[in-house]
Image (spheres, rainbow, N blue to C red):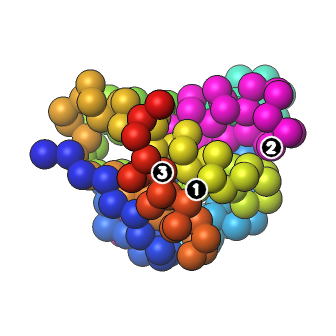
Amino acid sequence: MQNIEVILGDITTLNADAIVNAANERLLGGGGVDGAIHRAAGPQLLEACRALPEVTPGVRCPTGEARLTPGFRLPARCVIHAVGPVWRGGSEGEARLLASAYRSSLLLARNQGLRSIAFPALSCGVYGYPLDKAAGIAVRTILVFLAGDDLVEQVQLVAFSPAMKTALEAALKAPLG
């Protein structure tokens, strides 16, 4: 039985198989969710990220992709670092890249045998993606993935604000389209 739940809270406290980090391409920490996850996981997380190979100079994880590290001091066993796009008005392929970041995270979880995963609202912080648009993409991408997968059982969508929680709940109630 697969389950999607929307919660308002701190993703670093969740006891999931994996939590998703709203990372940047360098994977060297940052602000918002990224900084909170790095602080909670401890310095070993930065070391593990630095150990990941660069695919181009300074880029360990291109936008739309995801990488896996251990969770270290987090309750979660693993951290999936996903890089969503910066919002540039919607005509630069942002929707495709955002969906790809969610899908890549779910594929990593499935390939690692992880049954529960918690997502923040990728690209909705400093990357400026409009909440309603991002919530719709997140929910549609996750639902389509889960329809073809029976390993991932629990997905939590973790909102950082009441407005994000409302947007995610509305997207979850909307028909796929």
Q: CA distance from mark 1 to mark 3?
A: 13 Å
Task: Indicate the secondary structure of the residue bearing disc 3.
Answer: helix
Residue 87's label in the rendered image is: 2
The foreground one among 20 and 94 is 94
Q: Is residue 29 inside the magenta stretch?
A: no
Residue 32 image position (x, y, % from top left): 70, 67
Look at mark 1 in the image and give the residue it sits on. Answer: 121
Q: Tell me if residue 52 comes above or below residue 153 in the rendering.
A: above
- Mark 2 and mark 3 lie on one chain; the one further toward the N terminus is 2
Query: Does any portion of residue 78 appear in the rendered image?
Result: no
The magenta region covers 75-102
Look at mark 3 in the image and give the residue it sits on. Answer: 171
Q: Residue flagged by tag 1: what amino acid is it?
A: Ala
Residue drawn at 40 percent across, 63 percent down: 6
- Mark 2 and mark 1 lie on one chain; the one further toward the N terminus is 2
Task: Indicate the secondary structure of the residue bearing disc 2.
Answer: loop
Q: How many marks?
A: 3
Residue drawn at 79 percent across, 43 percent down: 86
Residue 159 image position (x, y, % from top left): 53, 67
Residue drawn at 18 percent across, 33 percent down: 150
Q: Are marks 2 and 1 in contact (CB under 8 Å)?
A: no
Q: Residues within 10 Å of mark 2 (few under 14, many from 20)?
A: many
